[in-house]
Image (tube, helix red, strand yellow):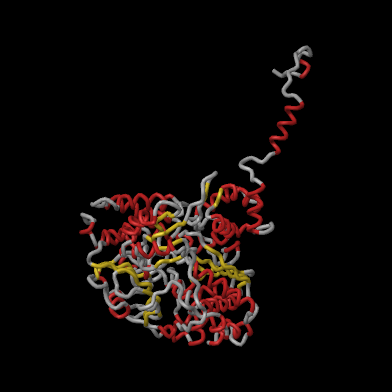
């Protein structure tokens, strides 16, 4: 039945929905922004620290560092002001700030935390007594403005146990040494001298890290010293055309150099792929080095930064790169100060026209060692890996074709091109070619970076480069590739250490981080340490990794392992995780099940 307007009686009483004042008030309330609003004082403080707007979106993490450093934490009212100043949602700022371990988000009127003492609880440091330090230091330092917390691997495994008092590293830490640093207000990283003589190529088949003098701030080759040693001559030749790009790429290919961050992709081939992409093209350099047991990049960087910078710039010239972004892990405070100083010198006196170079600071997230997660972090976002394809060589940083390299890969470019590819490829054992920088820690007499031939065995590495096992220890097991590279027994200590040689045994070399266990250690304890690390460092983006690592860590604490359930988790993590963290997390578990069944109460 259709009812016309005329069907309504004109005598119906009028109903007042709202007064004029009510309507005005409703309009005023709707015009106000929802959520927490910034206050003038917080906004003024943020502007004073960051400078005038506009602020690039990709600099969010850099700005968070500025606030975190200045105020000792990230007060929520400053985060609201930062969101307003950068014109991005507060939720986005908060999500990024809470993703990274080194940011302290402080709510309401809570006070900023006092002095923080971080005790590394990575495997090498745990073997050296980190848990004892964690138990004793809180009482020794008092409960006032000093807090003691456990920290994942900080990249000083050869100095285990390693502690950091704010930004001041304490190698071979004792309770007395840490207390002394706190009492003496040693909170910053020592400054290094810039007049060293260092030639890594001359140390081939030798120890790079000095055995007798372990310094937290070793002298390095500064700009003047590097130029005096022929530095940047190669870059000038490439930039001027005296040396053509094809010759450089051919030298890289002929040398057999593969990516030394862990993936092992041939460096020369990567240059060709990105060179053929459409400009503009970018470069992302990975110095996150978060794999437990790895410290080789730090060792080279803090001694010879310009050799790396020249390698990076040669690659940029050859490939046609418009901008280079260097991503450095936050734990390397001394390296950051060093790089900032030397980059300023380089840009003030450039050997040729330079691309844009930006140094970006990580914020404590192992996952950012994965190339696409690193790119997300450089863009100022949470460091969550991307799905592939597309690959970053085609669609990478800021959506542009991107050449991604590990620090050490670029470090060898100058020597390979100038000395000839045969120089690098002439080294090797057991049918392998090239040099490998092994980060060796654990139960050896002389830990450190060993520049040894590819294909060397762990027994040869220990005996020839490390002075043998530490007194009172016999080789029991070893991790050939850090946390994710698996664990092998001493009886398998004659396997050549190189790319592709360890996969048949359920392991891989990765970044060549070798952690050595003695006969008084248990391999299962090492695996538990690794899984706890993975659970702590999972970005949480995918369920198989987020839930699987935590569940596996809990199951591995049992005296007798539930191998059937653990293997179910292994399969799901390996098959369904987005990135290498979840895919490789089962490696230590499976190695224990296969090679050390006596330690877990039963075999598969």
Look at 38% across and 78% down and name the residue there. 210
Residue 498's spot in the image, x, y percent? 36, 74
Q: Decide if residue 431 is on the left or right side of residue 321.
A: left
In the foreground, 484 or 515:
515
Look at 33% across and 64% down and name the residue there. 486
Above or below residue 197? Residue 410 is above
Q: Decide if residue 463 is on the left or right side of residue 278.
A: left
- Quadrant (top left, top right, bottom left, bottom right) of the N terminus: top right
Residue lying furthest top: 11
In the foreground, 476 or 63:
63
- Quadrant (top left, top right, bottom left, bottom right) of the C terminus: bottom left
In the foreground, 196 or 504:
196
Residue 429 location, quadrant:
bottom left
Look at 58% across and 70% down and name the residue there. 324
Residue 188's spot in the image, x, y percent? 49, 65
Residue lying furthest front: 183
Q: Is any part of residue 531 visible from this angle?
A: no
Above or below residue 557? Residue 292 is below
């Amino acid at each position: 039945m259709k009812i016309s307007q005329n069907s309504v009686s004109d005598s119906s009483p009028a109903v007042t929905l709202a007064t004029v004042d009510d309507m005005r008030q409703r309009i005023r309330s709707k015009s106000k922004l929802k959520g927490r609003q910034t206050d003038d004082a917080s906004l003024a403080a943020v502007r004073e620290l960051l400078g005038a707007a506009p602020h690039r979106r990709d600099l969010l993490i850099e700005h968070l560092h500025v606030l975190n450093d200045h105020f000792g934490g990230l007060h929520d009212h400053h985060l609201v002001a930062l969101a307003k100043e950068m014109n991005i949602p507060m939720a986005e700022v908060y999500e990024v700030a809470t993703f990274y371990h080194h940011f302290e988000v402080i709510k309401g009127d809570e006070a900023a935390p006092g002095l923080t003492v971080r005790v590394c609880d990575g495997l090498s440091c745990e073997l050296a007594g980190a848990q004892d330090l964690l138990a004793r230091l809180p009482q020794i330092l008092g409960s006032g403005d000093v807090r003691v917390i456990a920290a994942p691997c900080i990249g000083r495994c050869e100095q285990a146990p390693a502690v950091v008092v704010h930004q001041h590293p304490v190698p071979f830490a004792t309770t007395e040494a840490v207390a002394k640093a706190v009492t003496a207000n040693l909170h910053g990283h020592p400054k290094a001298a810039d007049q060293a003589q260092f030639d890594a190529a001359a140390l081939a088949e030798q120890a790079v890290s000095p055995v007798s003098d372990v310094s937290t701030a070793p002298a390095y080759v500064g700009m003047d010293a590097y130029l005096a040693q022929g530095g940047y001559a190669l870059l000038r030749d490439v930039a001027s055309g005296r040396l053509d790009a094809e010759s450089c790429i051919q030298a890289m290919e002929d040398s057999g150099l593969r990516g030394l961050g862990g993936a092992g992709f041939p460096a020369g081939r990567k240059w060709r792929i990105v060179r053929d992409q459409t400009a503009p093209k970018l470069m992302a350099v990975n110095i996150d080095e978060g794999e437990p047991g790895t410290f080789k990049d730090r060792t080279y960087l803090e001694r010879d930064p310009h050799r790396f910078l020249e390698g990076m710039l040669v690659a940029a010239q050859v490939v046609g790169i418009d901008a280079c972004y260097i991503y450095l892990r936050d734990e390397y405070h001394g390296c950051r100060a060093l790089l900032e100083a030397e980059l300023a010198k380089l840009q003030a006196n450039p050997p040729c026209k330079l691309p844009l170079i930006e140094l970006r600071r990580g914020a404590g997230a192992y996952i950012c060692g994965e190339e696409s997660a690193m790119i997300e972090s450089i863009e100022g976002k949470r460091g969550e890996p991307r799905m592939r394809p597309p690959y970053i060589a085609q669609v990478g940083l800021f959506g542009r074709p991107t050449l991604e390299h590990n620090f050490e890969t670029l470090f060898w470019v100058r020597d390979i091109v100038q000395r000839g590819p045969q120089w690098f490829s002439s080294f090797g054992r057991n049918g392998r070619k090239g040099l490998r920088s092994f980060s060796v820690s654990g139960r050896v007499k002389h830990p450190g970076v060993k520049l040894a031939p590819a294909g060397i065995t762990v027994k040869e590495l220990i005996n020839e480069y490390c002075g043998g096992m530490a007194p009172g220890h016999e080789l029991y097991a070893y991790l050939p590739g850090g946390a994710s590279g698996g664990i092998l027994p001493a009886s398998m200590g004659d396997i050549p250490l190189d790319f592709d040689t360890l996969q048949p045994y359920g392991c891989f070399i990765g970044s060549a981080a070798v952690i050595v266990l003695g006969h008084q250690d248990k391999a299962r304890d090492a695996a538990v340490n690794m899984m706890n690390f993975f659970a702590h460092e999972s970005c949480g983006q995918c369920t198989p990794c987020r839930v699987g690592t935590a569940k596996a860590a809990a199951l591995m604490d049992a005296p007798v392992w539930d191998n059937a359930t653990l293997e179910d988790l292994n399969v799901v993590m390996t098959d369904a995780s987005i990135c290498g963290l979840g895919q490789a997390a089962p490696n230590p578990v499976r190695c224990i099940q296969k090679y050390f069944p006596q330690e877990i109460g039963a075999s598969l």
